[in-house]
Image (cartoon, rainbow, N blue to C red):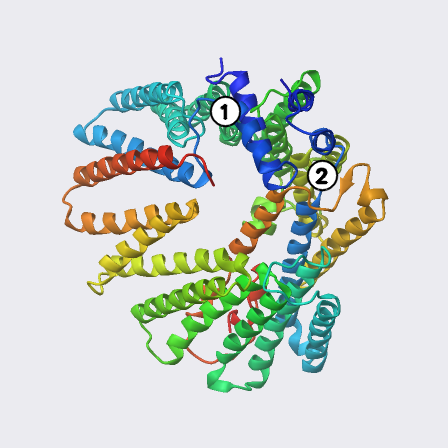
Amino acid sequence: MTTLERLEDWRKSGAIREEEYKTISALVRKERFSVFLELNVLLYLGVLSFVAGAGWTVRIYFTNLGDAAIISSLTFLIGASFYYCFSRVKPYSNLQVESPNLGFDYILYLGCLLLAVELGYLETRFHLLDSQWDYYLLFSALAFFAGAYRFDNRFVLSLALSTLAAWFGIRTFRLEWITVSAVRLSAIVYAGISFGAGLWLHQANIKKHFLETYLHIATNVLLAALVSGVGQNTSSWYLPASLAAATLSFWGGVRYRRFAFVAYGVLYGYIVVSIEVLKASRGFASVLAYFFLSGAIVVLGMILLARRIGRES
Amino acid sequence: MRVYSALEEENIRDGNLVREWTVSGLLDSMQGNILRTELQTDLRQTNVFLRGVLWIFTTLIVITGVGLLATMDLLMSHTQGAILFIVSGVVCWVLAEFACRNRLYRYGVEESLAVCAAVLFAIGVSEIFRRNGEWATIVGLAVGSIGGLAIYRRFGFIYAAVGSLAACAAIPFQLDIGIAGKRIAAALVFAAALALVRFQRQESEEPAGSGLPAIEATAWLGTYLMLNIQLGATLFAVPAWLFYSPYRSSNPEIATGFYIFSWAMTWLLPAAGLWLGLAKKDRLLIDVSVAMTLLTLSTNKRYLGWEVHAWDPMMLGVVLMTAAIAIRRWLQKGPNDERDGFTALRLLRSDERKLAAVSIASSVMQPHASTVKQTDAPHDFREGGGSSGGGGASGKF
């Protein structure tokens, strides 16, 4: 039985109304066919390609083109992007705001990326902040956060979060704690701040739909940092902390039906346990036996979980 | 032949559609619940993340299980090793069947077992031919390809059909027939699959869960990838000697005729795919054709031996953005914001979820790892951060 035949049956039995039948059957017959996603992807790729080309051109030709030409062109493009966005933006709301048009989000994203290119160029050429140059990253991150919230743009929010992460990483080196554990600690602090900020903004009903972006990034950074700590064997608190974080991710995922977090909890938790167990293992056969048995336990556990919570997503 | 009945496949297909229509507001939640109850099967399904975890850990169990058996006799001969792999493959297949009889559907476990069965069986048969030298890989790929096809026919896993095609197309690369011959033979494999699937789609109604559009799109892409000989140099910086230039041949094995033919095909395939995709409103074919077009635009200069400039990506970016905006405007100017049924409006919620996923993923693709390796103030401009959505200011200084 085809979907159309089924729809017809439902219409006849009164399960769906005439107008619903018309709307849905038009989609099934492809009489209405949306290319929304395809156009968005084209715009996204276009922005990435443009900025990559701009960065490459500036790097290769900055001696030929001269500072004035480069800075004025980049400033013009950034100004035009932001002018476009500010002139068309809808009034601010704490709720999700639809973009005024398809290209709007990407023009803002383009402006933000070009701003980052220009700031990088300015510092490289003129050393305005000199040894404190990493503050450009902090400034960029704050500007991107402001843009993400004002214009309700998830791409710019991701950019802000990753730029802030870079600042945390560099800040560690600027303070000359040039050790892996220092970067790890800074990653944990970053994850904590992102996690806290995301939850606080969610509680305050400010752009609640941004929460998942915060949580995905913070959870991965936190778990990766803690797991690497267990692997490096630098401190005894990494093991309980990583297990606690993995458990929390797993529990939160089950509790709120966000199964990506269940997967994070299982995978990172399994890696942590495996690192600890394999430290004490002797011989290749015992390693294989461990993976065989532990894998079986995980599969059984996951099947039980999947049966309990079904196929919700 | 199929482990799941046609009715079950249809119910699952329509159940997923009803869920999508409900979250998109085309049906109210009460209607959605009633219709989904009507479409319920006794098959056990799970969501994509748990499915992925189950897939990974089942594969881990199979690999370590076979490894454990192998370590029991480290002095195992080729034949004994081959028997171990073949028997393990058979056991995996039986277990996959058992899992499906227990009503698992796209659960990760039965998928992993079926795939492991085909891979282990292929390795086992390949081991038997190991003594004959060059035939071992060819036989292994051929058996793997047949195994993938068997999985698709029995369980309906579309990626198994794709894997089967890829394994079959890899066979010519094991033969001593020259680079052009290998590429043409591999492209013919994909083209034959393409013709077969298209014929099948035209002749009869697509059965639910057949995945024929996905297989056809893969065949288009495979044919293109085999014929575009500049792709490796452009995307992966593969050594230039592997490729041929009509102006300065570095590889005489590839004849000029083939070079021109392949260049022509890099334009013809995306154009034909796009035309057919738009005519049938086949989303996967449209998407693959657009991807092929982008690859053609990226490799065309190298094909023609023209100089590649730093600003080329900027030009490509402008073209892409302009094209997207122009298409959107053109569609919006039509009656009801559409032309011939095409619209730039979002009709289903799934599009928004996919975009949200892309935006989260964009944060992962940042070049910050290179940044934190720097310990001193910047001396030389090395912007590059913008290429994947990350602040250029954090690029390599």
Whether tag 1 and tag 2 are in contact, CB under 8 A, the answer is no
Mark 1 or mark 2, whichever is nearer to me? 1
Residue picked out by circle 2: B270
Q: Is disc 1 placed on a helix, strand or loop? A: loop
Residue A242 falls in image quadrant: bottom left
- In the rendered image, the vertical position of residue A198 relative to residue B376, given as above or below: above
Chain hosting mark 2: B
Extreme-top residue of the structure: B1
Q: Nearer the viewer, residue B158 or B99?
A: B99
Percent across and percent down for residue A182 are: 32, 71
Q: Nearer the viewer, residue A61 or A190?
A: A190
Q: Residue at x 42, y 44 (%)?
A: A259
Residue B338: in sight, yes or no?
yes
Q: Earlier in the sequence, mark 1 or mark 2?
A: 1
Percent across and percent down for residue A209 are: 54, 56
Percent across and percent down for residue A127 are: 54, 85
> How many C-alpha atoms fall within 10 Å of the one at disc 1: few (<14), some, or many (≥20)?
few
Chain hosting mark 1: B
Q: Mark 2 belongs to which amino acid? A: Pro
- In the rendered image, the vertical position of residue B295 relative to residue B120, given as above or below: below
- In the rendered image, the vertical position of residue A68 relative to residue B280, given as above or below: below
Please state the total of marks drawn on the protein image.
2
Q: Nearer the viewer, residue B177 or A292?
A: A292
Relative to residue A35, is residue B121 drawn left or right? left
Q: Nearer the viewer, residue A309 or A69?
A: A309
